[in-house]
Amino acid sequence: MNVLDTAAVKDLKSLYSSREFEEKYTYDKSDLGALCTWDGTSFKVWSPLAEQVWLLLYKTGADAVPYRRLSMEQGVCGTWKYHTRQNLHGVYYQYELFMDQDRVITGDPYARACGINGEKSMVVELSKTDPDGWTQDEAPIRPPENIIYELHVKEFSWDPAGGFPEEYRGKYKAFTCEHTTLNNDGIHATGLDYLKDLGVTHIQIMPAFDYATVDETGGDDQFNWGYDPQNYNVPEGSYATDASDGSVRIREFKEMVQSLHKNGFRVIMDVVYNHTYSLDSPLQKTAPWYYYRSHSNGAAANGSACGNDIASERSMCSRYILESVLYWAREYHIDGFRFDLMGLLDTDLMNRIRQALDEMFGPGEKLVFGEPWSATATPMEKGSIPALKKNAKSLDPNVGMFCDDTRDTIKGHVFEGNEPGFVNGKAGLEEDILKCARAWCHTQVPVKAPSQIISYVSAHDNWTLWDKLSLTTDVSSGLSLEMAYRLAAGIYMTCQGSLFMLSGEEFGRTKDGLENSYNAPIQINRLDWTMAWENKDLVDFYRGLIALRKQLPGLQDKSSRAWLRFKEGFTRPMAAGYILDNRPLDDSQTEPSPWDLLFVVYNSGKKSRTFTLPQGHWEMLADSQNTFLWKNHETVETKSITAAPQSFVILGMTGK
């Protein structure tokens, strides 16, 4: 259908919104796609407007002409089906559909495997793609704190200095390489050993489903972040050692997850269910305009700023997304999901996903969080509530949200390059810094509990922390960029909520000032493993903060009563601090902490600030110079503590 035929789109919008269509065409079984079973191979596709559907079979993904063309039988609720007793594992296929005098050839929107660039779907017997030991693969025990490290598959290992085998650089297989070192010197750890030493608990893989903006037949220098979905249930082929064989990418993705689990990391998948790369998609071809939102005048919605919005509130679309999430969790052992532009999805769907994962794997076992915003508004139907920050109270407490309030308060507005925040010189943010610390609970932000908050200062989007502070820190006035950097980390790592960081933040990662590097050369986007060792002092600073965080139940507390731990908050011009109850909850599995109370001070000013300590035995735990002071258990002998300019101080009261 011509995407510019707005009159026809309006008619379809009316049809799909009708109760009659909903009752007649909602299909509630989980057997769509191509399935290899004990009695052969079955194909089933949902295409309620189709008048006839043919199944086209190809021997390879490169074949232009099918070797068989088979008529599909019309099933119930708008489905079309075909079954054979043959095991067609490795056979490629497409659907040929006829509807409203149009002929369309398309891949399968429910495909679990595909060929080069996702053009043809592939039949796969999934058990044949399992690496050795896959059935015994398990995630590490759930940690007391979530410290999430955002990582792009290609960025991780592309740098030659990382010491990865050349044939695995930029691939899933790089994650299976253990004990890599800088330039293979056998001394300076890179890769998995480096990440283990850093102490992060979760590796968040940027989009690794099949996306459209990298040619899988092209060279290794191609790069894209991957927020351009083509096949939602298939791994991206450019990260595989052989993209032409649909089984290889599946096996190697599983090997990546298996290796990360073995090395102590949980794995989060970055998912993009809010839009597709284009409207020329299998979803659109099999059910024109059903899976996409449109305005009342028939124009395509564009709340994603990518040309289209997925209509998550429609029953078959919400079911598609829910089943896709469960498929990745079940088949690929994924431990959590980060939802891109979650504000374009509806709260009912997000709550259903949370509930389904809890029922299948245990309460809270899988993380669910996302961006509680959209590029612009989107025309949801049926009175649906978008999963925006302002609607947090409509979300399950265990559906998390990136906290832009924390991010922007600490370092300055994310879109205004020259606007500073607390750490780089902006005055009047002292009270907001205290709100950051308690995860914005009981503030103007409608947060139920710290379980809903992701505290962070940098992600793949926009400037890196180093580049943002480089733009906004007035060093001519006496401010220090490095001290602002350390203070930013010290603040968000002592806020309640889950912690999140961009890979390389710990060594001052830069993209040479480029704000949006989504398709910039890999040379700009790659992790610079040499820099990680050149800035070892900064890496150790982060390492100490992470290790300390794991000992602080008062900050790990995700319950709705966590904010009550704050016994006192105090401010001075350009400075703020708090006293926090750090004892574990009675029903908590968190290990007891050596410190019953915390005393935390942030000073972003150019002058030192002195604060009186409550009576008790206080130990220095960390400051902007040394984040391993907690190892010394040295008692503070004075009755006050002084925070140097642009610095923080963390103290703990012992029960002595």
Image (cartoon, grey):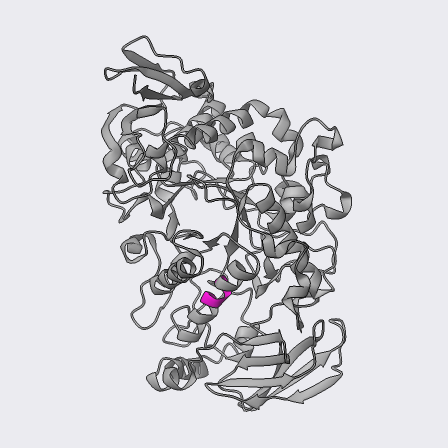
Which of the two residues, 303 or 558, is positioned nearer the viewer here? Answer: 558
Where are the magenta residues, as a range?
Answer: 321-325
Q: Is residue 159 above or below residue 286?
A: above
Instruction: State whether residue 202 is above or below residue 210.
Output: above
Q: Is residue 91 left or right of residue 108?
A: right
Corner quadrant of residue 530: top right
x then y, percent, for residue 303: 42, 62
**Magenta portion: prevailing SS class:** helix
Left or right of 129 on screen, residue 576: left
Q: Residue at x 44, y 71 (%)?
A: 319
Q: Position of residue 549 (x, y in %)?
A: 42, 31
| Quadrant in the picture for the C terminus | top left
Q: Is residue 483 above or below residue 173?
A: above
- Is 565 left or right of 100, judged from the image as shown? left
Q: Is residue 345 magenta?
A: no
Q: Observer-nearest residue: 327 or 409?
A: 327
